[in-house]
Amino acid sequence: MAILQNLREEDIKWRALWLLPDEVLYRCGNFNWVPLLGIWGAVGYAPLLVLRQYRSRQFIPVT
């Protein structure tokens, strides 16, 4: 528990270690949506929307 309480911002890496940052699939043909196929069907994924937060600090806006 002490490890979690003493974490600093530089101790955390907010990325998947296997993901190469220069190779991101962001479109499928002429479409900006990439279909992700699973056992229950397909889900539309919009990587360009995710890329806005990919390399920036994420935060929850004050309401």
Image (cartoon, grey):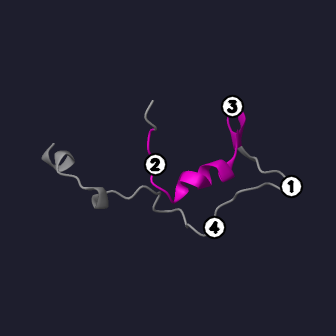
> Is residue 61 left or right of 34 when viewed as pictured?
left
- Cα distance in 3D space between marks 4 and 1: 18 Å
Q: Residues within 10 Å of mark 2 (few under 14, many from 20)?
A: few
Of the residues under marks 2 and 1, which one precedes in the sequence? 1
- Where does label 1 land, which residue? 30
- Cα distance in 3D space between marks 1 and 3: 25 Å
- Cα distance in 3D space between marks 2 and 3: 30 Å
Q: Indicate the amino acid at tag 2.
A: Gln
Which quadrant: the N terminus?
top left
- Cα distance in 3D space between marks 4 and 3: 27 Å
Q: In which quarter of the image is residue 60?
A: top left
- Where does label 2 land, which residue? 58
User: Residue 36: percent from the left, percent from the top?
Assistant: 70, 44
**So how many labels did they put on this image?**
4
Q: Give whichever of 1, 12 is nearer the camera.
A: 12
Q: Indicate the amino acid at tag 3.
A: Trp
> Which residue lies at the image location 24% right of the left edge and 55% below the top edge?
8
Q: Are marks 2 and 1 in contact (CB under 8 Å)?
A: no
Query: Which is more foreground, mark 4 or mark 3?
Result: 4
Q: Indicate the amino acid at tag 1.
A: Asn
Q: Which mark is residue 40?
A: 3
> Is residue 35 left or right of 60 when viewed as pictured?
right
- Where does label 4 land, which residue? 23
- Cα distance in 3D space between marks 2 and 4: 21 Å
Query: Which is more foreground, mark 2 or mark 3?
Result: 2
> Is residue 60 left or right of 28 when viewed as pictured?
left
User: Residue 61: percent from the left, percent from the top?
Assistant: 46, 38
